[in-house]
Image: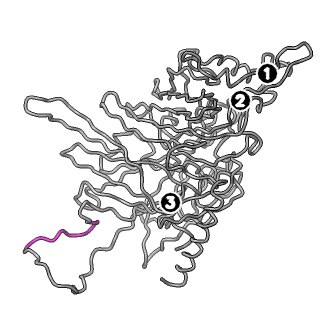
Amino acid sequence: MNRKNLTAAVLAGLAGVAGIVGSAQAVNINPDGLGQVLIYPYYTVNGGNNTVLSVINTSEDAKAVKVRFLEGKNSREVLDFNLYLSAYDVWVAALYDDGGVPTLVTPDTSCTVPYFYGGDGTQEFVPWALTDEEGYDPDDITTLGDISRGSEGHFEMIEMGTLIDQDLGEDDDGNDLSYNSATAATHVAGVPADCNQLIEAWTWADSLDPETRGYWLMNPTTDMTNPSGGLFGGAAIINVTNGTMYSYDAKAVNGFAANLDANDLLHTEPGFTTPNLNSGDITTGYVFLDNGGSTSWSFNRGVDAVSYVFMHDTIMNEYTTNDDLGAETEWVVTFPTKHFYVYPDTSKSETVLAPFTTLWNDADDEGDLLGEANQACEVILLDTIWDREEGIPGEEIPTGEPIPPIVSPAPPPTQGPVTPIVPFTLCYETNVIAFGADGGNLLGSSNLHTIDNATEFFTSDHGWARLELDDYDWDEDEDGIVECVDGDGPECNSRDPLGNLQGLPVAGFAVEGFVNTFLGEGNDVLANYGGTFQHKGTRKVGSD
């Protein structure tokens, strides 16, 4: 080990010790799945798919939760509302396409504000935040982005606080001044006691008379105390026609906020853009490293601590595109905090913030490849793609005479193929990578990048691949192809780190689908199968 690596290792060890000491007051991803914040990396209503979802309150206390759906390109809000969960409550909903408009439907009686169950249980996604496209005129709503842009993306649930029944005493006439909000949200015989009370708490009875404001409009902390965690959830992408279901667990973030009044307030009026992932008052992130150690870093913004716990320099997963099995593979790659770094309206910076490298719609000085409208592209490297026998692109499978075993030590091997570093761009907050030349059928994504593993690299149709999120560079040839080489040409550089971690903040999973067209003699029934597999990853401290 050289001195540089030794120093980096010692520093990593010291940071790990500091992280252990301070982990009680640090943002972290809970491997057991319970948290204050839940990140759901993907939803879609494309390609005949619906998405069903759930959130569960495992605590003995009622909870106030912000539910927010973010479209896939730049995480503009397409729907958010407040959810009030009873102790031990479950809330479920589904997303579907209604004539080109993504729509939420719920059969669940738990209190939402506005209350969806009280009507037909549905709520369309809305376009009012799609102001980030070229040609938008604030005086002309017809220039807003098309709501069909919200047909895929990701969503998050943020605990705003714990509901209580606060004793406010009596007035001079002996009338009880208490509101008992926790009791109103609590189920009695399967139905909340009084969802209408919670709606009225956020209602102006007369918009011209401040005295008619609901009690939460006057004081959002009434009947509220600090968030306490204990949420978990999951989602499933279901295609009824194909008979497929791809399910996953939400990522659970703990230690997000310690106080109800974190960054002003967590408990906010429905329709507010807060709380968001920058609203937590805990600004230290804490992660475990691949070597069993740990590290932490303190920031000025809460969102940086959240990004820190999602940082990876590589992600890895399997793929299969075998024609005989009707197999397809798609990877969801979501950067759940990206807009806080690349979009000035939420980053509050006119320049891109590390670890990202390109502003939303920012034109690249050297060409349009990284500067097309309505995107913020990051160069990602397909570090290596292997088949199941460790074969890599360009490697020839030995044929001919058998090769007998030999004694050790063996002679030096002949020079093998160069491991490929194939660059491409992911331009959105929620992206899908499809393997195979005809990929993209499983999730129906419009934020799609295709990797043609079968013909572009070699003939294998199953194996695994690794994406490099740390090193990057780009160039263009006459065909506009991104190139990155070591040696004669532009060298790969490293992104600026976030804290002491290299890479990008990423979440996601792989989806594999299979079609069985023959189930036995005399049986022509079609059967579809599928599964999801969480991405695996590595973390890199400093420049080691």
Residues drawn in magenta: 392-400
Q: Could you classify mark 2 by the number of other residues whose Cα lies within 10 Å: few (under 14), some (14-19), or many (20 or more)?
A: some
Residue 40 lies in the magenta stretch: no
Reading the chain from its start, which is encountered first: label 1 or label 3? 1
Q: Residue at x 48, y 82 (%)?
A: 1
Residue carrying label 3 = 312
Q: On screen, 133 above or below 452?
A: above
Q: Residue at x 40, y 35 (%)?
A: 237
Q: Residue at x 53, y 28 (%)?
A: 91
- Marker disc for residue 178: 1
- In the image as oriented, which residue stretches furthest toward the right? 172
Residue carrying label 2 = 164
Residue type, label 3:
His
Question: Label 1, label 2: how many angstroms apart (C-alpha)?
Answer: 11 Å
Residue 398 lies in the magenta stretch: yes
Q: Could you classify mark 3 by the number of other residues whose Cα lies within 10 Å: few (under 14), some (14-19), or many (20 or more)?
A: many
In front: 103, or 295? Answer: 295
Image-quadrant location for residue 412: bottom left
| Residue 294 x/y as whole percent | 55, 64
Reading the chain from its start, which is encountered first: label 2 or label 3? 2
| Residue 345 x/y as whole percent | 68, 46
